Image (cartoon, helix red, strand yellow):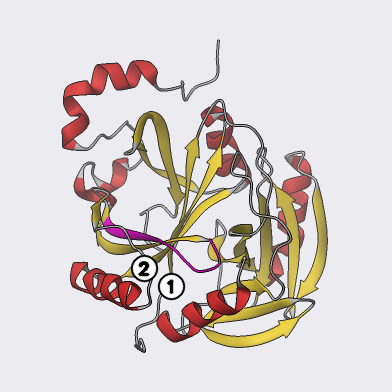
Amino acid sequence: MAMTRRFGLHHVTMLSTDPVETLRFYREVVRLHLVKRTVNFDAPDIHHLYFGDAGGRPGTLLTFFPFTDAARGHVGGGAAAAISLAIPAEDMETWILHLVEQGVDTLGPTERFGESVLRFEDPFGLALDLIGREGIGAATHPVLAGATLLSQAPAATEALLVRLMGFELAGEERGLRRFVVPGTGESLDLAREGAASPVETGAGIVHHLAFRVPDEAGLGEIRAELVAWGLDPTPVLDRRYFRSVYVREPGGILFEFATDPPGFAVDEPPERLGTSLQLPPEFEPRRADIERRLAPLTPAG
């Protein structure tokens, strides 16, 4: 069944360890805004931290589960190997100096698909590719631009991206095939060869990639499409700030499809996003216990 819709990124969710260091790095080094402090709805003794632009718009979001006891993960098949963040091409030198001042080691810049790419890692081992991109205008923070994917079945992953999700093949080089969402500036680089070993989940690993769906009707449609493909999506889940469906695509990577509405302003005003812990209504009777179990978000002492 062919899709005509185009699925840009909604957010990408990663695993980290220390929530204080997660906050520091993504606010001070990557220069994103903390736009929501909540909990992992499936494990509410763990924070769920959302970073993005000041308004927390879908398509700008990096989110983290900081499991304080997590071991270091190892990238492999069934996960993203790196997350791409775009900056204006003319700002690359400024960002190199900024990262040096922050004590962050960098690799490059190198060239990929005609663009300058600077790679660095967060404190937990997650690879971040800073892409110097023409024509994106002035920006005070990087823009979520895509990911590099390691699939256990690249041909099947490619078929899903193109035939179901509306991605288009834009080029191939050095073992990567680039797929783009026309009109969004976003891309997924898929390793042409299957990964030699599966991912070992842990700190520094991408948990899932989420793609935008305009509304709940569209979410129901994509869920039906996934079932028709022989996949096993979850029921529609209420994540408070969006409704979503998860599915393990044929190459082992966890995808989520998430609605744009209702957004982050459902439980705190736009000018106060990320300033206090927000819980879904069903967790409110347990607030005191949840707050006691959560790791601190401020440095000790």
Q: Give the quadrant of residue 286.
A: top left
| Residue wearing tag 1 | 8
Magenta residues, dominant SS class: strand
Q: Closest to the observer: 175 or 98?
A: 175
Q: Is residue 26 left or right of residue 254?
A: right
Q: Is residue 247 visible?
A: yes
* Quadrant of res 48: top left
Which residue: 72% across, 73% down?
193
Relative horizontal placement of residue 262, taking residue 124 as reference (left or right): left
**In-front residue for pair 149/212:** 149
Above or below, comparing residue 107 to residue 116 in the picture? above
Check disc 2: other Cα within 10 Å, few if <14, some if 14-19, many if 20+. Answer: many
Q: Position of residue 126 (x, y in %)?
A: 65, 47
Q: Judging from the image, what secondary structure is the residue with disc 2 in?
A: strand
Q: Which mark is residue 212?
A: 2
Part of the protein shown in magenta: 243-252
